[in-house]
């Protein structure tokens, strides 16, 4: 006995002719799966930003998935149509990627420079546009979700990591000499900060305290071997190496409470670094010639031994 009941036809994936913004790929996916095409458009946009996977998928769909002729059937197409669509999609995709990169980097930079409120206002305005589109049924306004996400994500990351450009950007090198007084501290937003204290006059058991603050980058403090170094280092993500005492990972809170012996000079460091690396060395590791080809592990062992002599052994 046979049944006349037939299973319902599954919608075929065809690029839509009406519901399209570029080549109808998102509209076709939405119709094939019975969901709002905006879901696929946002997903493709996210994959597009995450390494360009969405762009290649879209190109493949344009090349191999036919368009709907308006009746649910595949429309015939010639090679010229495919080539033209390929050029259009490539040009639009490249332009969109460039615009997204500019928005992404601009939002991160503006937030770090203290303009987080301005970025938030723009995202809020885009959100109001999305709400207005939902209330009025204006479907094109739903695309405002893409720039809103591109702007909001880097701004949120920068704010959460407390990254700031206060103090400037670039390379800063300080090398006080003789009896020069040290400032309370040094600050840099993004870059490399080098504080060379080897030429400072450490006679008469000189004691100094120095605060260092950086958002993203590398901090290097260079001291002579006879100086006993105590430190408190906080790194959100990265590494800290104080004369061979190393820590790496996230939320680093390294404390080395050491006191110089009578007659010995001492330096107390308080370091706050959001993302990057912090080092205390007896030599300048920013120059390859200064290491003489020695391995970092050998330098760590030698400097740790020298630090012990300056502090621990000197107290015996």
Image (tube, grey):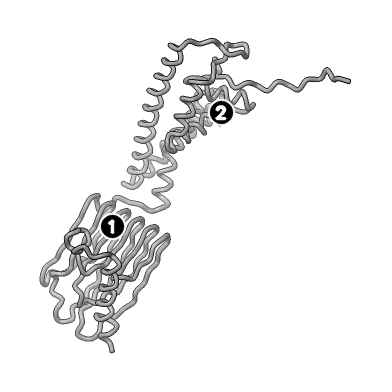
Q: Give residue 309's position: percent from left, percent from top.
A: 25, 81
Residue at 85% over, 20% down: 3
Which image quarter holds the C terminus?
A: bottom left
Q: Nearer the viewer, residue 302 or 219?
A: 302
Residue 255: which quarter of the image? bottom left
Q: Give residue 186's position: percent from left, percent from top.
A: 24, 61
**Badge nearest the viewer, 1 or 2:** 1
171 is higher (above) or lower (below) than 235: above
137 is higher (above) or lower (below) than 205: above
136 is higher (above) or lower (below) than 203: above
Q: Nearer the viewer, residue 72 or 147?
A: 72
Residue at 57% over, 19% down: 14
Residue reaching furthest left?
178
**Residue 134: mark:** 2
The mark that comes first in sequence, 1 or 2, is 2
Residue at 38% over, 53% down: 162
Which image quarter holds the N terminus?
A: top right
Residue 177: which quarter of the image? bottom left
Q: Secondary structure at mark 2?
A: helix
Q: Secondary structure at mark 1?
A: strand
Residue under pointer 1: 218
Can residue 228 be seen at all in this image of the molecule?
Answer: yes
Q: Is residue 229 left or right of 158 when viewed as pictured?
A: left
Q: Is residue 3 left or right of 215 when viewed as pictured?
A: right
Can residue 126 be seen at all in this image of the molecule?
Answer: no
Q: Give residue 302's position: percent from left, percent from top.
A: 26, 73
Neighbour tally class for label 2: few under 14, some 14-19, many 20 plus, Cα within 10 Å: some
Neighbour tally class for label 1: few under 14, some 14-19, many 20 plus, Cα within 10 Å: many
Image marks 1 and 2: residues in contact by CB distance under 8 Å: no
């Amino acid at each position: 006995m046979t049944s006349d009941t037939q299973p319902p036809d599954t919608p075929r994936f065809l690029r839509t002719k009406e519901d399209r913004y570029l080549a109808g790929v998102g509209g076709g996916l939405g119709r094939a799966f019975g969901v709002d095409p905006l879901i696929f458009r946002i997903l493709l946009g996210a994959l597009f930003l995450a390494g360009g996977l969405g762009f290649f998928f879209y190109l493949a769909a344009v090349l191999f998935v036919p368009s709907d002729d308006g009746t649910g059937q595949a429309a015939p197409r010639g090679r010229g149509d495919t080539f033209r669509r390929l050029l259009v999609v490539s040009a639009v995709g490249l332009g969109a990627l460039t615009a997204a990169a500019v928005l992404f980097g601009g939002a991160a930079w503006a937030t770090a420079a203290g303009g987080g409120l301005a970025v938030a206002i723009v995202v809020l305005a885009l959100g109001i546009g999305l709400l207005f589109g939902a209330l009025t049924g204006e479907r094109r306004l739903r695309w405002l979700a893409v720039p809103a996400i591109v702007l909001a994500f880097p701004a949120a990351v920068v704010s959460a990591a407390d990254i700031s450009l206060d103090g400037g950007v670039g390379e800063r090198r300080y090398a006080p000499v003789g009896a020069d007084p040290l400032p309370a501290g040094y600050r840099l937003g993004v870059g490399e900060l080098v504080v060379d204290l080897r030429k400072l006059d450490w006679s008469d058991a000189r004691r100094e305290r120095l605060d260092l603050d950086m958002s993203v980058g590398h901090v290097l403090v260079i001291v002579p071997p006879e100086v006993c170094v105590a430190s408190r280092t906080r790194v959100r993500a990265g590494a800290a190496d104080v004369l061979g005492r190393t820590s790496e990972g996230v939320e680093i809170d390294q404390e080395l409470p050491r006191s110089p012996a009578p007659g010995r000079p001492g330096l107390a460091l308080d370091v706050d670094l959001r993302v990057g690396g912090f080092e205390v060395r007896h030599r300048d590791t920013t120059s390859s010639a200064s290491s003489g080809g020695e391995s970092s592990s050998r330098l760590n062992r030698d400097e740790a031994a020298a630090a012990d002599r300056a502090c621990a052994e000197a107290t015996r």
